[in-house]
Amino acid sequence: MVTNYTPAQLKMLVTETLHKEFDVTPENATPENFYFALSQIISNLLEEKHDTFYAHAKSTGAKEINYLSMEFLMGRSLKTALYNLGYAQAIENLLAEYGVSMSSVYDCEPDAGLGNGGLGRLAACYLDGMAKNGYNAYGYSILYEYGIFKQKIVDGWQTELPDNWLPGGKVWLRALPQRSVNVTFGGQIDETWMDNHHFVTHRNATVVKAVPYDLYVSGYNSEAVSVLRLWRAESPSFDMESFNRGDYVSATQQIATAEAISKVLYPNDNHTEGKRLRLRQQYFLCAASVSDIVSRHMNEYGQLDNLAEKVSIHINDTHPTLAIPELMRILLDDCGYSWETAWEMVTRIFSYTNHTVLAEALEVWDEQLFKELLPRIYQIICEINRRFCSQLYEFFGDGSPKVGEMAILWPNTIRMAHLCVCACHSVNGVSKLHSQIIKDDVFHNFYLYTPEKFQNVTNGIAYRRWLSQSNPSLTRLLCETIGDGFLTHSEELEKFRAFAHDSGVLERLEASKKENKENFANYVYKTTGQTINPASIFDVQVKRLHEYKRQHLNALNIISEYLYLRENPQADFVPKTYIFGAKAASGYFLAKQIIKLLCMLSEEIKKNPQIAEKLSVVYLEDYKVTLSELLMPASEVSEQISLAGKEASGTGNMKLMLNGALTVGTLDGANIEIGEAAGMENMFIFGMTAEEVKQTQPGYQPRKFYESNPVIHRAVDLLRSGINGAQFDDLANSLINTDPYMVLADFDAYRAVQKRVSAVYRNPEQWNRMSLHNIAGAGIFSADRAVREYAQNIWHL
Ligand code: 26W
């Protein structure tokens, strides 16, 4: 039975834990002592709650969902867990007795930054949604010792510092050494036939031990608890043989090579490097997770024949694709199933989500590297490919070029996405537009072959994290106007629309935003010394730094406004603060140059106080989940300005809309659905559509825009001549010569829409009403809804 603690019991538990762990009384405890004590108590409670839930789920024979992802961008756990369990108020009161604030305790927790951006945060949101909906869910990933790097801006340049999160974060992890799994790499494969049976043995392989650590994720007002099972790599044993030979170095080398697998998260987003260590990470995750899934099932049912009825495995982008051949390997080599039966099971079990259309993000492995590192998996992929190609020849006709285009193995490479689409019963995109593009372009041939596999599930967010847990003043206003049902059923936010013409509500909405802006400005002042004018428009672009997201389009417009104000210092200009936050992949030069540009613009403008009153740029260092929770409530304009057709969905756009920000965006990803939900008249759409991009991109000559448009010309020239003493020739040349994301083509439209934003802002009533419509329309973007769609249409729970 799960305990439901009363405030008095909580107080006793906290007192006992502080005494036991730190030998302090609550009166003498530091915020850090409280953080560890509370985290331990809550984590124990969740463990107990999970065990009860799991036993119940198994007793009913419920199907289980396993979500495999190389990334889970969890952020902090304590605040959200207290909130979901209904203990937040009791703990706040308790701490107040000792003169300790909740925020000082929360601030002791590091972000679990085990992800890069959208894909990793989505996985974290879905664990929340699955627990809320009462599904039996396991997330599987790697326990990176170092998460996404800490970003430090030095003289405008991004530098990367290691994110050593475990000292503060491990209190949330439970080690399960008894469930460790051995994962094998390299070696040679021997195959023999005996009595019509195929036997496979693996010689000279290197073994790495995978040790699981569980992190529990509570669901709002729910009995269910999701588990995030993270694998840590260890050497199975100290190599005594080398050691005894006196080869101490090679004995320790073996340990280092094994442990390297879970040392650090690759900081690339939307770009593959094809590195050996990355392939080792991927197989490590897949082999350990599949083995764990199979052994849990065996414990429960004592057989695998019903595996496909009881288990779904979801692949978050192609990074965990190797789980497919790994399950084939277990069914064939370890369990003796025939190829046909094993394949039938595998295809029923696996489903796949694609999260990007960028060519440089599609994973392709070098065949030679692959064969050396994973010889048995390689053989299995060859056989999958052979059978697949022969079916394709049958379907498309002998000699069809489509077969080569669709093959899994193609001159010296293995295409992971093709393996996924071939083996999974469901392939989905993450917004309506993106799912269409997948069918029309990215996987068009596959769509012709198996159209029934293709689906859409528009992304959703763990909306309570960014609303009730981050924006108390807006939450209060909502509760007082529409009741608190929206906390359980996000669709109830629609009721807020009834107040679109209630001037009292609109004014309170404005007051709430003002309060949040002041809080954020204070935070920025306290942590960086920069001042922000809280009366200016807070215009926000926060996301990974990538050319396709076009932070440089935003920058070019700011440059033009700066040049305009320099010549017209008296101009009647609505004050605006452009706020940026973004990490760049460490080897992505142009992205780093754009960060430098934004920082130099910020400095350059500050030199001219008259202009700085109307225009300013703030670059937030080390943007992460926790910072987003502070920023979203204070935001007024949401910049979603990717080149149409390139942003699969976006999820920051949803968090901002939910907090009443108005979107300035292209018709890309989920922006389109945001427009449908809020009303197109309540957002600022500009630029080419995906269709127009497709038409005009071939033969695009950015130089013509540069030569014919004086505003563009001056802005680009300033990049060359220098801003705050720094020159940006590479960026300028890229824009004029290739401009792969058509910044110059959309520039005029962007500038025009920014002017409209300022004009509308002069009319607070209209602005507040538009904001209200955005909040009211945001319910559909909840992770609860998205996860429900996966459960119904894909996992068949
Ligand atoms: C192998 C390197 C690598 C790493 C990460 C390639 C690709 C990725 C991700 C798929 C990139 C990513 O995070 N995509 C984002 O996924 C979000 C969740 O669906 C979407 O909202 C974003 O639009 C998409 O860019």
Image: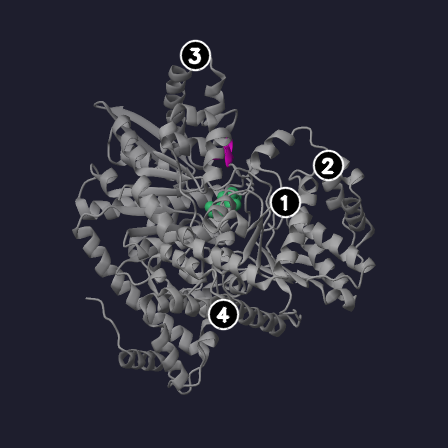
Mark 1 Cα within 10 Å, few/some/many (few <14, many 20+)?
A: some
N-terminal-most mark, 2 or 3: 3
Are discs 2 and 1 less than 8 Å apart at CB?
no
In the rendered image, residue 367 lying in the magenta stretch gets the answer: yes
Amino acid type for the residue under numbered disc 4: Arg
Are discs 4 and 1 less than 8 Å apart at CB?
no
> Residue 223 appears in which quarter of the rendering?
bottom left
Mark 3 Cα within 10 Å, few/some/many (few <14, many 20+)?
A: few
Which mark, by number, is residue 702?
2
Q: Secondary structure at mark 3?
A: loop
Query: Where in the figure is residue 620, as x and y percent of width and height?
Result: 61, 62
Which mark, by number, is residue 398?
3
Which mark, by number, is residue 508?
4
Q: Secondary structure at mark 4?
A: helix
Viewport quadrant of the C terminus: top left
Highlighted magenta segment, given as a residue range: 363-370
In the rendered image, residue 730 lying in the magenta stretch gets the answer: no
Q: Which residue is mark 1?
A: 547
Amino acid type for the residue under numbered disc 2: Pro
